[in-house]
Image (spheres, helix red, strand yellow):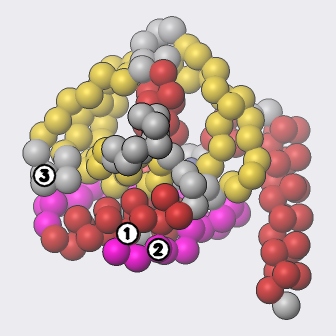
Amino acid sequence: MAVKKILIEPNKLLREVSQPVKEVNKEIQSLMDDMLETMYSANGIGLAAIQIGIPKNLIVIDLLTKEKKKDPIFFVNPKIIKKSAKKSKYEEGCLSIPNLFAEVQRPSECEIEYLDYVGKKKNLKATGLLATCIQHEIDHLKGILFIDYLSKLKRDIILKKLSKQKLEQKRLVI
Ligand code: ZN
C-alpha cells in the first residue's frame, strides 16, 4: 500500500468524467488499497480515485463511526438507483478542497448498486452521513465538486481561500 498525492482544486483532472472498471482484478484491488491508505492518512471519510488522478469509477468510504475502528467500504462502479424526495443539509468538506466547509443540501436517503472489493454485486440503502458521503463521492466520478452547489459568491470565497492556502504552503516548502 502507498499514500498517494491528493489533487487540490483547481485541477483539470478533478473535472474529468471517470470511466467504468471492466474487471475487479489485483490491479484494481491494489489501487483501492492505496486509496484507502491515502484517505486515512489525510483524515478523510471518503475518496474517489480521480482525487489521486485516476479516472476510474472507484470510491472508498469509512465513516469511522464505531469508536474509530476501521470499517471501510469499497465501491466499484457505484450507481445511484433511487433517491429520496426528502432532503437534508450537511456541512461538507473535501480532501481536494482542504480545511474549507459549506452546507450542501442533498437527498437524505439513497440506494446504490455497486461491485465490492472482490467484484461481487451489492446493493446498499444509505441514510444519514453515509448517504451524503456516497453522493459526494459519486459526484467526483462525474467531475462535480460540492462547491458547484453553492452560490457564485460563496464558491468564489472558498476558491479565494484555497488559493491563499496554496500560496502559504508553497512558502513553507521554500
Ligand atoms: Zn470530495
> Would you say 24 lies left or right of 99 here?
left
Per the picture, the main secondary structure of the magenta-coloured stretch is: loop
**Mark 3: which amino acid?**
Gly
Q: Residue furthest top?
A: 86
Q: CA distance from mark 3 to mark 2?
A: 23 Å
Q: Is residue 58 above or below residue 3?
A: above
Q: Give, as a single range, the part of the protein colored magenta.
A: 1-25
Residue 16 can be seen in this image? no
> Would you say 70 lies left or right of 163 here?
left
Q: Which residue is mark 3?
A: 119
Whether the residues at callouts 1 and 2 have beta carbons within 8 Å, the answer is yes
Q: Residue furthest bottom?
A: 174
The answer to which image quadrant residue 14 occupies is bottom right
Q: Which residue is mark 2?
A: 3
The answer to which image quadrant residue 5 occupies is bottom right
166 in magenta:
no
Q: Earlier in the sequence, mark 3 or mark 2?
A: 2
Q: Which residue is mark 1?
A: 34
> Would you say 139 lies left or right of 83 here?
right
